[in-house]
Amino acid sequence: MKFLAVLAASLLAFGSPALAAPVAKPAAKAQRIVLPTDVRPDRYDITITPDAANLRFTGRADIALTVVRATDRIVLNAADLTLGKASLSGQSATPRIVADTKQETVAFVFPQRLAPGRYTLSIDYTGKIYQQASGMFALDYEGSDGAQKRALFTQFQNSDGRRFAPMWDEPGIKSVFALSVVSPEGQMPISNMPVASDVAGSPGTRTVRFQDSPKMSSYLLFFALGDFERISQKVGDTDVGVVVRKGDAEKGRYALESAVKLLGYFNDYFDTPYPLPKLDMIAGPGQSQFFAAMENWGAVFYFDYIVLIDPKLSTESDKQNVFTVIAHELAHQWFGNLVTMDWWDDIWLNEGFASWMENKATDHFHPEWNTWLSTQAGQQGAMRLDSRAGTHPVITDIPDVFAAATAFDAITYLKGQAVIRMLESYVGEEAFRAGVRSYIKKYAYGNTVSNDLWVELDKASPRKITGTAHDFTLQAGVPMIRVQSTSSGIVMTQERFGADASQRTPRTWRTPVNVVGSNGQWQGLVSAASPVAAPIAGPVVVNAGQTSYFRTAYSPELWAKLAPGFAGLKAADQLGLLYDSRALGEIGVVPMSDFLALVKNAPAAGEPIMLQTLSDQLAGLDWLFEGRPGRAAYRAFAINRAAPIAARLGWDAKPGEADNDAILRRSVLTTLGDLADAATIAEARRRFDLYLADPSSLRGAGRLTVLSIVASTADAKIWEAIHQQAKASKDITDRARLYSYLGASSDPVLAARTLKLALSGEPSPTEAPGIIGAVAGSFPEMAYDFAIANRAKIEALLEPGQRAPFFPQLATISRDPATLAKLAAYAPTIPTSSIGEVEKAAASIRFRLGLIKDRVPEMEAWLAKNGG
């Protein structure tokens, strides 16, 4: 699954390591709540009849099972299902049905114990079709003929298969699934496997049966039904297809071409051919606040915006995202689907690996995109979370399926990715791949824990990694390597990077470190056990290449040698210095002037991703100066840094320019708009007026750049013009973007109008939460208060597992101390498993308040002397 977080972009820009209450002693590991193991399923035969118009469906499940130990009951999962007739083969007695709605289980209780052996449990039931992405859900849209249409899809990760059929809905319980659907004529049904039979039924219907799936976990089952069309291409024996709403086939062509390339790459990398006869990518209109795509085996689901390309509307960034997300989901076909974690505490085995592999594969096919540089922004987001309250280890205790939703976060995905990249860099690409291949072959169609992977990697590599892997996956936190100069080189010591004393409880990591200096290179492990010396002289770069997960704190003497040569460093190391100097400055390890001086001296013609990072950092820090006397000086400083970059790139794309230059243009112009640069805003409004008169005057990234700038500075007239464009848009993705731009206004009156619009019924159910999230980017307190006041309405628009986290995420970038009390009042109203999301938000706010109190005056003083 490709996860999303509410306000993800804002969190990376504004989020910071957080001040928190003292850390308590680790709690005893909670007892895991799982299904009994005395009965196991072997095969499901499921038949469903959807009633899309009334958002209901009927179903029948015939489950072939084995009673392993004598028992008087069969317990499995069911949620929001109304169970009817139930029977067990060989048993004349009708079982008594006992439902536990809290645990989402149902027990079929028999008057006498069942002897060990094989049985078939048959259940008739009815279920609900949702309007948010959980279980079976409906997405409404306007077809190419102008008619309103409804398509059905499913989303079962992490634990919503139980909303589709009664089943053992846990990742460690694998079974064969045989699905049949009674479908209306003219509708295309899609599932994990190809169609086995298609038979006419009652007038206007057909019964379609799909081939048996391989043995797999329940969360990977998939079904869709709608007015679709499919384009396809063969890769060996695999039929690769893209399934889209009728009329959108060409928008899926880029995705198909990308998948064809990537499938061949993964077949080779894993040395295990993709095992299913087909691999479909299904596009659905709409969005989720939680995820963008889901790796269902053989039938990967994507929301339109993450898989379809429209030359008139899509940007260079969109194309990169489509390729990368497809790479992520295809990597899951092996890491996650063929080999699956045994329980949700090892979800990182799926997601961290796929996140790493998406970048490895993308870099293979598109080295010009410099993908590994882009990943540093995500790693920084993980580090920020990992150094404040509410963090958790990569392998985290998940006591039940309800807590699993909280594990789909930046720690699991982005720290997980960073740890894997660090380990591969340490042992070498060939040894790492050999270990992965061995792991896949050994555990195919089975379930694993993380140690199973470490064992195979240690077998393949002369450098053993289990100890390092344990250090970085079994404990939370970020190492910090301090570097001092000596007469013979440097000496490195390790401590913990944290926001305050409570987050600096001593821990040790066996950290791979790569040092490059004027006289050579040194590689080795550094831990807190003892200082490590390296005979490296001259300007020294620690964590050269930025492939390891730690922060580097240089002594003033070493920094004085390194910083002046910033422009001559490799781009990855320039990024490392920017990120580390800001993070270390924020917590007082080094002065904030280290970061500001780097920014001041950064070349305007540097590497695009480095300059984009610089631009984003400038926009992010501006938030701290709101209402401060030094804001004008800061903005003048920031504009002086960003304006030369914008002047070099101009407003219009140049023939043959690199994609990353186009992405940088949009970033730096948007930053200048955020900084209230008068010239930038005037030009954006001029272009917007031309666009209203002639829509063909803007397209792609140029259009979105202008829209984002005018939206953030909108008056009522501009706001209404964008509103009318959103209402009139025939493109689902563009419509959602336009609605989100309405939430970007810096005018509180327009922000309030946008919030009211979100729940007016005009935006679709999947668009409304995103509109509220957009308002939170400028008015977090207003958005949070509105959401709490309309909590029941908003929760109805969210997937069940994301209801509790949504509200505190709105408040995350608040600068108002009163928000802390509001979060404290909210916390007791949600499940205990979601309290960590409240802790994260509160910690971020506390730290931001600390920055405003302590660091902003420091920056204001530096700007007064050096800001020109």
Image (cartoon, rainbow, N blue to C red):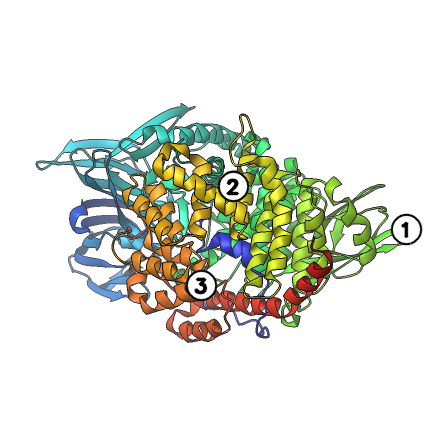
| Residue type pointed to by label 2 | Arg
| Residue type pointed to by label 1 | Ser
Q: Is residue 26 left or right of residue 1?
A: right
Q: Nearer the viewer, mark 2 or mark 3?
A: 2
Residue beneath the point at 42% across and 59% down: 747
* Image quadrant in which you'd find residue 160: bottom left
Residue indicated by mark 3 = 780
Q: Earlier in the sequence, mark 3 or mark 1?
A: 1
* Image quadrant in which you'd find residue 802: bottom left
Is residue 88 something one can see in this rendering? no
Provide residue 330's location: percent of width, then percent of height: 45, 37
**Front residue of 405 and 545:** 545
Is residue 23 something one can see in this rendering? yes
Distance from disc 1 to disc 2, alpha carbons, whole Å, reads 47 Å
Distance from disc 2 to disc 3, alpha carbons, whole Å, reads 25 Å
**Front residue of 540 and 433:** 540
Badge 1, how many Cα within 10 Å: few under 14, some, many 20+? Answer: few
Q: Are marks 1 and 2 in contact (CB under 8 Å)?
A: no
**Front residue of 63 and 119:** 63
Residue indicated by mark 2 = 666
Q: Earlier in the sequence, mark 2 or mark 3?
A: 2
Residue beneath the point at 11% across and 36% down: 204
Element under disc 1: loop
Element under disc 3: helix
Establish if 467 lies above or below 230.
Answer: below
| Residue type pointed to by label 3 | Pro
Residue beneath the point at 36% across and 31% down: 251
Tell me, for residue 488, which label it has, or none: 1
